[in-house]
Image (spheres, coloured by chain):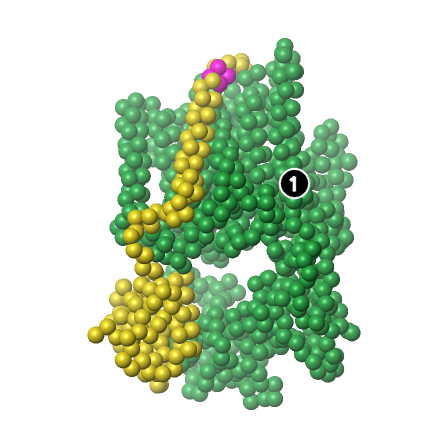
Amino acid sequence: MEPILKLNYGVARPMWLLTLGIVLSVGLLYGRLAAIHARPATLPMSSLATVPPRREDADLFEQALSAGLLRQDADGRIAIAPADLPLRQSYQREHPEWLTPRHAEPDWLDRPWDDASRRLHRALHFSLAGRYVRQQIAIFNAQHSGPLGNRQLRWVGTGVREVERDD
Amino acid sequence: MTESGSPAAKPGGRSQRYSSLRRRWWIGWLPMLGMVWTVYHAPAWLEPHLLRVALDPGQSIVLGYEALWAVQADRDHVLLRRESEGGWRLTNLSPGKQVLWQPAGETGYRPIRQWLLRPDAMFTVGTTSFTVRTANANRLTLQSDRHLWEYDGVHLQRDGQPTPECYPGWRNRLRSDLAALGLNQLAQRPLRLGGGVYCADRLGIAGVAIDTAAVMPTRAGFVLQPGGAGSDAPLVMTATGTQEAESLERRSILLSIDDRLIVGRTRYRVTQTAPHLELAVLARVQRRLADAAPPITASVVSVQWRPIPWLWPVDSSDGWRLLSLALTPLLLGLVCPRRNCWKIAIALALAGACLAIYRGGPGLPVLWPYLLTWPVLGLWLATVRSPWSARLLAALTLLLGSGLITLLQLGVGAGESGWLRYGGDNAALAGLFGWLAWAAWAIRPGQRLKDRLNLHWGVRLLGGAAVLLLAGQILWGDERGWIGLQPFELTKLALIMTVAHTLTRRARPEPGDDYGSWLNGLRYLGPAVLLIAVGGFALLFLRDFSPLALLLLWALAMGWVWLAVQPHPPLRRTGQVALLGLVVALAIGLNGLQKHPENFPLNFQADRIRVWAAPDRYPHAGYQLRRALEAIRAGGWWGTVWTEAANGRVMGLPALENDFTPAFFLNRYGSLAGLVLAGIQAALIGVLLLIAGRVVERNENADPLAAPGFIGLAGLTGWAVYGGAALLGAHFLVSWGTNLGFLPVMGQPMPLLSAAGSHLTLFVLPVIALAVAVEEQNYDDSH
């Protein structure tokens, strides 16, 4: 086969393009790294926040409490909706004969059940934040055994606390 | 290779080649120097080699991570009791972690909290009692207060009536079909005890949380073991009504010589039971610094220490096994009559040694895989003739070298021995690929074989294999892969080859190809579209979405290439403008999403988008990103490795060996080294694109009658290298984006840096090998 010299003529242009590609990549990475090193708090959006942002665990706890997925027992301890509640809900509609007989334990099937409840339940049982919330509830339950009285449950800082009622 | 075209035959060619070889020699040595420095600079660790426990009969002791030097074990993990007759009993005390046991002479570990269900045995879960009526390998019958339960490993029946499927879906339908065909072994699943529902694989128990206990089908029959719910209170009692009644959580085993145990993540073998109990440490154990006093642990436990095995095996049988795998090809090479047989035999012998190291135990010397891999990189660097191949391999050597040194540092700087396996496995796999490629290069099929290669069927075969592996992953694997492989890596290779095949035929139609209508054009796009659809479906099904982001970036790049070969200028220009518009729209959309994550239209992965936008609000879901950024800041521009030999706090970052290896690299070697790394990565992509461009350009200008073989194979390879470069570039972008927080977290490794064996051997190295092969062919034909 005859040599195709054209292939080797254009070496200068590829080298120029190659250099440009390298400089662009390194430059963009430098910009990002410089931003990270310049401000310890440099993160998307966080620098715009003027007040400490609400944490995901606080949101999850309070939403689960208001949706009925967390309940205060008479002794002040917190009960968590069972992990198979979505299955129980669907069996209550479609196969009630295959639900286990309930004795004295609380009935978790008396609350409205919609997509929002389902999402919240999934977050409570199958997310990192949910796991943390459940751990904090276990700690709270281990330390509290008396009725709440005129106090209410709140997520304060990184865990569950009893606080005076707002009203 | 043409004799007349040899560079040595030209004036000045010899000195030019020597100068080039000198440069390559230095590049080849750089990773070796890095490895030597890493080993020299490593902390002087000592690892427990043998634990000896001395107890008098009747005594017992609670041991945990301190006394056992076990990784990820609890403080009080096991109870060890010396029986009055001298035997040793072990009980798992940990509420949430298993102790696995492999009795001598058996294969496979099992939890010690496991109880074989035999006829007439009784057990209770909560307050509900069960009596085993029948139990064999295929069927279990349990009697409770009011009902008779039958389980065949797939479906539960109550009083002869089948329970409904818990979650109807095609996977469970397939399971039922397999069971109906008598293939229960392929469809078996555990029966979960507890919860509020009776269904196909759940036996509800009032007042007991779902998955408090599970009945597992095994070869020996059905066994009862604790479920995943976890509970501090003992809820499951075995052998009730007998003198052997005990809580399942407190079941104990009698230890014998050659039993194996896993406590936390650490493996042991029982080597002696009298007069003392001796446990040899097999793998993954905590280390201590040689110059620090050993911590005071239980006085009845004594420890024998050893340094890290750099060059000599702990057990000489490991060395012999490796040698035997390597010797076979060598002997074959001696009896082979062909002239270059010895080359092939040596390459195969070294590939065999790499494979043996990859499959071998953790007792092998740390540096063996590295010492087998550097020579093959150097050999390839010295062998290639085209300057573009040499540049590509130089970039590969530097990147792979950096990756292996980073993973070696990860292993030698950690306070636990198990981290060494990531670098060792990657090095062994890279060596295996390199030596096999060298053997294939030495064999080099003749022109007649090349002409016989049916490209169309070759590409289809590759695509078929990828689809089959994906199907296997869907049926029997999960997001992490199947049979130790990540099938999607082969799918990527199949995808770029299929699309390359389509582009080759579009750019250079063969006789009979008709692109006159859109319909005919689509016919050639069919296989690629099908493969993308199957791959996309599999990823969606496995809920592994990050490869879809890679495919999107790759598809944009290949769309550009596809438009570039369109023969009609108006179509080409309009298409390219539209594609550019799409890229700009995507960038604007991504920016908008970061500011307003609540606008993300889909349910899945919405949490990742929210975390990406405001990681401060998500201390749990955003943990990885926050820790990565902290590690990068702690490393600064110069890194910590120069002053601190041990890795320190960065080891707490999850997925450090894989998705977050770049953060580890930046922490240890500094951001300046990161810039150099990114520069070499850009060079690698650039050289790949240039090689692909050269091949495609040559293919377009070549006379099909003068170069029939080149047109098909090289054309296909050229487009495949384009596709491979685009996908590699997407990988680099996604990985940097994940680690630096400018993209949502996506679980993808950084090519040539992270520990990812399938990614390295099924995708990255094949793409580079294709580029080198076609460039060498191109160079030989042009000189």
| In-front residue for pair B5/B219 | B5
Residue under the point 48% across and 18% down:
A11
- Is residue B362 left or right of A95 when viewed as pictured? right
Residue B178, position in %: x, y? 46, 63
Q: Secondary structure at mark 1?
A: helix
Residue B356, position in %: x, y? 67, 48
Give the amino acid at mark 1: Trp
Residue under the point 33% across and 83% down:
A147
Camera sees residue B485: no
Say if the magenta span includes residue A72. no
Q: Is residue A80 above or below residue B458?
A: below
Q: Which chain is green?
A: B
Range shown magenta: A7-11
- Is residue B180 left or right of B82 when viewed as pictured? left
Is the residue marked by circle 1 packed among few (<14), some (14-19), or many (20+) residues within 10 Å? few
Question: Does the magenta stretch mainly form a helix, a strand or a loop?
Answer: helix
User: Which of the 4 image quarters holds residue B79?
Assistant: bottom right
Question: Which residue is the site of mark 1?
Answer: B37
Quadrant in which the C terminus of chain B appears: top right
Q: Is residue B590 above or below residue B82?
A: above
Q: How many marks?
A: 1
- Is residue B497 left or right of B370 when viewed as pictured? left
Say if the magenta span includes residue A8. yes
Residue under the point 45% across and 85% down:
B127
Residue B275, position in %: x, y? 78, 74
Residue under the point 73% across and 83% down:
B84
Q: Which chain is yellow?
A: A
| In-front residue for pair A84/B641 | B641
The chain identifier of the residue carrying mark 1 reads: B
Residue ranking furthest to the left = A167
User: Which of the 4 image quarters holds residue B263?
Assistant: bottom right
